[in-house]
Amino acid sequence: MASVRPLRAVAVQKTPEPLVKATLNPKIRVSLAPALPPKIPAAAPGITLDGGWDKRLSRGMVVPDVTIDLHGHTLHSAHDLLDGALARAISRKDRVILLVTGKPPRPESERPHARGAIRAAIGDWLAASRHASAIAAVRNAHPRHGGQGALYIILRRPKGAAVS
């Protein structure tokens, strides 16, 4: 446990107390605190596909541009492989990635922690990824592409690309 480090530290940002400048008119108060930029919510993967995409994905009619297989990897090596593969797929302007993670643990399993560690971490990895803004959605794969043991990662269309 001494060698375990978080993937990315998140700093907690405190809102500064506004400084108030006294004026001649006690009813008028001027704040000298710096204005904080408005928080812009990041588009969460999973809510940006239209019905046509969802229909084609659920019927298995989409052919993935690239497949990433995380079988046999440790959490660290799987994270590194996923990050590099996402960077390459984005640079090639791929749209659909098939991510093979392995099936989640069975509920009746005696040791549910022994299987599915990578699958359980995928959502957090993608949300915290440097590529999160390029991900349009994450969906379960069709049985022909791995079913419960795989996911589709749909990347956003690059700016200026023609609609297909």
Image (spheres, grey):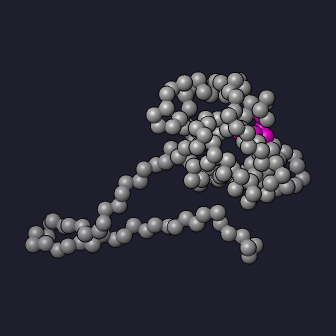
Vertically, is 31 above or below 72? below
The quarter of the picture where the N terminus appears is bottom right
Is 162 colored magenta in this rendering? Answer: no
Q: Is residue 64 left or right of residue 29?
A: right
Residue stretch in magenta: 147-151
Q: Position of residue 85 (x, y in %)?
A: 67, 47
Q: Main secondary structure of the magenta part?
A: helix
Q: In this view, which residue lies farthest toward the right?
A: 110
Identified at 68% across, 27% down, the residue is 62
Vertically, is 43 above or below 25? above
Residue in front for this viewpoint, 114 or 135: 135
Is 150 colored magenta in this rendering? Answer: yes
Q: Position of residue 69 (x, y in %)?
A: 77, 44
Identified at 63% across, 46% down, the residue is 88
- Numbered-mark total: 0
Residue in front for this viewpoint, 48 or 163: 163
Vertically, is 82 above or below 30? above
Would residue 109 be seen by someone viewing this image from the given angle? Answer: yes
Would residue 45 be seen by someone viewing this image from the given angle? Answer: no
Q: In this view, which residue lies farthest toward the left?
A: 24
Identified at 79% across, 40% down, the residue is 149
Residue in front for this viewpoint, 26 or 127: 127
Q: In this view, which residue lies farthest toward the front?
A: 92
Identified at 35% across, 61% down, the residue is 36
The quarter of the picture where the C terminus appears is top right
Q: Position of residue 144 (x, y in %)?
A: 79, 29
The image quarter in which residue 152 lies: top right
Q: Position of residue 2 (x, y in %)?
A: 74, 76
